Image (cartoon, rainbow, N blue to C red):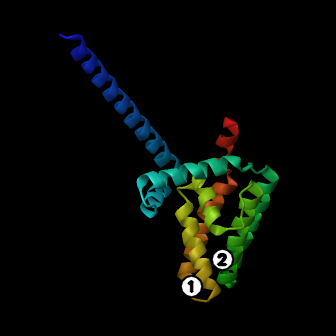
Amino acid sequence: MLMSTVLAIIIAVVVVLALLAVAGSLLVRRRRLRERFGPEYERTIEEADSRRAGESDLRAREKHHDSLDIKPLDSGARDRYSRDWSNVQQEFVDQPEDAVHNADHLVTSLMRERGYPTEDFDQQLKDLSVEHGRTLEHYRAAHQIDAQSTEHMATTEQLRGAMVHYRALFDELLSNGGGQARHART
């Protein structure tokens, strides 16, 4: 064989191996994002202009989230929030709309105490998606019903559903969700 033929084969093999390595790396990154964000991964990809743009958004969320000081609750705060949630649930019997509003405020307060910014709902969703992507749809649904109830447009069954939805995120935030794992990494 001529030296130029051998060199061409070697270059072709190196290029193919490099392409396989890049493709493998992309697949690993995509799988990691899917596992971390859960259903939020697909939602973000569907809303984005492209898969690349969606994944870039998710990585930006991770970077922003890492800059936050998310902290676990101490046992006293967990007990206080548990009592407050029980009170909100009891309130539901006589004043379901007020209970849903109070559940929203309680979840927001819990998020704030954990270290999440709470000024902008869309940013809340992005920040929560990093560690709580599997319960985020509950929060969206509850928030939407809460908005309907301010117009007195939500049925009692919808309000009950909102309480269940808020409870899903509340329980995860109260138990510190993924926050402990994050602090163990740092």
Residue 33: image x %, image y %?
49, 46
**In this figure, what is the number of numbered marks?**
2
User: Helix, strand, or loop for circle 1?
Assistant: loop
Residue 177 visible somewhere in the drawing = no
Q: Callout 2, which amino acid?
A: Val
Residue 167 visible somewhere in the drawing = yes
Residue 3 placement, left or right of 27: left
Residue 185: image x %, image y %?
66, 36
Residue identifier under label 1: 154
Q: Which residue is most to the left?
A: 1
Residue 21 placement, left or right of 5: right
Q: Callout 1, which amino acid?
A: Ala
Badge 1 or badge 2: first in the primary sequence: 2
Which residue is at a point 19% across and 11% down the rendered structure image? 2
**Relative to 101, is 114 above or below?**
above
User: Helix, strand, or loop for circle 2?
Assistant: helix
Residue 26: image x %, image y %?
42, 40
Which residue is at a point 52% across and 47% down the rendered structure image? 36
Residue 176: image x %, image y %?
68, 50
Identify the mark at residue 20; answer none if there is no mark: none
Residue identifier under label 2: 100
**Relative to 33, is 158 above or below?**
below
Instruction: Say whether marks 1 and 2 touch (CB < 8 Å).
Output: yes
Q: How crowded is mark 1: few (under 14 residues within 10 Å), some or many (20 or more)?
A: some
